[in-house]
């Protein structure tokens, strides 16, 4: 499969400053993340809140500037783009944000919010609004919503406006950050099917961030699991869901269907899926960041940082125990 997007060693640390403005440390939100997105493929990204998923999405869009690494879109490093070149790139890579309250204009009616990207690219208002009506219906909004202001809509309806606006430019890549989490199940199905249809009709590629493992499994060709800013496992969806190699991934799958309650569920034998609390990103554990909650951790996990290693073709995991079990 050819790759439309290639990310290499991408990293971002947010400085922490004291009362006098002096730097006293930092939060490593994204730590040397690398992956590839195939043409017309979908990469699902999962992990607990605070693991760096949304920060990673904003780095890809250059809404946040990274500290290191490169992001290649069709072999061109988008981190080198400026001005008009950067604007044109963002038309090809669109994002649906998790919070629709901050991503749509509260003073514009729904139809104009959706049509605005076409106006900005030079299309007439009449043609833009005609297309906007089509996408409104595609995401489950009726024409009666066209003249309403966002404040009169529910949270789920506002999210549908944001989804329609991202799709109206027919981008090559859509980054969906919890794009369907605010929708009820019936509308979720409509939007997910719409994404699947657009993948076929527009040769669309997607990065799909979600807490819902069932949605990720349905939408994704490949899955990447993150923990405290690092990638702990990635590979084909069938292998991740069928033969997860990392203890953290195994725990997430055991706690399905909801990651929000991943650490409140218990196994059949009465033991918790995971023990302990998520460490503070201000002071992450040494070595393997997952070791403080891993039931299989050893002394070695505190001093050595695991790296991604292939456990089967195309399937990688970062765990020292896996490295020990591998043949020399």
Image (tube, rainbow, N blue to C red):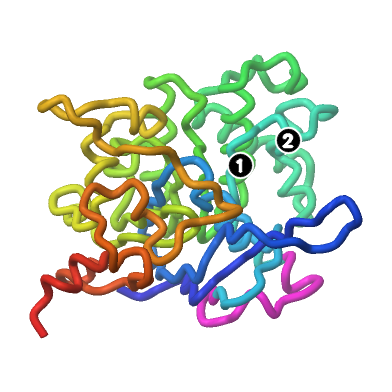
Q: Is residue 84 magenta?
A: yes
Q: Is residue 67 left or right of residue 108?
A: left
* Depth check, front residue: 32 or 219: 32
- Would you identify the image quadrant in which residue 84 lies? bottom right
Q: Residue at x 53, y 53 (%)?
A: 52
Which disc number belongs to residue 63?
none
Secondary element under disc 2, as helix, strand or loop, is: loop
- Would you identify the image quadrant in which residue 191 lies? top left
Q: Which residues are magenta?
A: 72-87
The image position of residue 46, as x and y in percent, is: 39, 47
Q: CA distance from mark 2 to mark 1?
A: 9 Å
Q: Is residue 168 magenta?
A: no
Q: Residue at x 73, y 23 (%)?
A: 150
Q: Which one is earlier in the sequence, the residue at label 2 or at label 1?
A: 1
Q: Is residue 286 visible?
A: yes
The image position of residue 237, as x and y in percent, is: 24, 53
Q: Residue at x 45, y 42 (%)?
A: 278
The image position of residue 300, as x and y in percent, is: 28, 68
Secondary element under disc 1, as helix, strand or loop, is: loop
- Residue of label 1: 97
Q: Quadrant of the C terminus?
A: bottom left
Q: Which residue sits furthest bottom?
A: 328
Q: Is residue 187 left or right of residue 100?
A: left
The image position of residue 268, as x and y in percent, is: 12, 26
- Residue of label 2: 102
Q: Are marks 2 and 1 in contact (CB under 8 Å)?
A: yes
């Amino acid at each position: 499969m050819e790759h439309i997007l290639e990310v290499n060693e991408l990293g971002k640390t947010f400085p922490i400053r004291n009362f006098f403005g002096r730097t006293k440390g930092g939060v490593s939100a994204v730590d040397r993340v690398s992956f590839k997105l195939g043409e017309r493929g979908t990469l699902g990204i999962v992990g607990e809140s605070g693991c760096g998923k949304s920060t990673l999405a904003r780095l890809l869009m250059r809404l946040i500037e990274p500290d290191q690494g490169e992001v290649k879109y069709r072999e061109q490093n988008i981190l080198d783009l400026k001005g008009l070149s950067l604007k044109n790139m963002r038309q090809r890579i669109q994002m649906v944000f998790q919070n629709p309250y901050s991503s749509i204009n509260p003073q514009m009616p729904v139809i104009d919010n959706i049509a605005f990207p076409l106006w900005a690219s030079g299309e007439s208002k009449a043609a833009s609004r005609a297309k906007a009506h089509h996408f409104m219906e595609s995401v489950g909004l009726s024409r009666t919503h066209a003249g309403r202001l966002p404040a009169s809509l529910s949270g789920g309806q506002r999210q549908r406006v944001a989804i329609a606006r991202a799709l109206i430019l027919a981008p090559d890549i859509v980054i969906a950050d919890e794009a369907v989490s605010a929708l009820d199940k019936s509308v979720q199905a409509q939007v997910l099917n719409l994404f699947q249809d657009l993948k076929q009709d527009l040769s669309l590629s997607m990065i799909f961030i979600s807490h819902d493992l069932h949605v990720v499994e349905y939408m994704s060709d490949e899955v990447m699991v993150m923990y405290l800013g690092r990638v702990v496992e990635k590979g084909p969806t069938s292998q991740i869901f069928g033969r997860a190699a990392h203890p953290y991934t195994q725990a997430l799958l055991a706690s399905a269907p909801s990651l929000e309650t991943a650490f409140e569920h218990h196994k059949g034998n009465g033991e918790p899926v995971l023990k302990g609390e998520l460490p503070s990103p201000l002071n992450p554990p040494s070595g393997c960041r997952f070791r403080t909650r891993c039931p299989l951790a050893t002394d070695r996990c505190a001093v050595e940082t695991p790296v991604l290693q292939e456990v089967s073709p195309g399937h990688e995991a970062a765990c020292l125990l896996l490295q020990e079990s591998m043949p020399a």
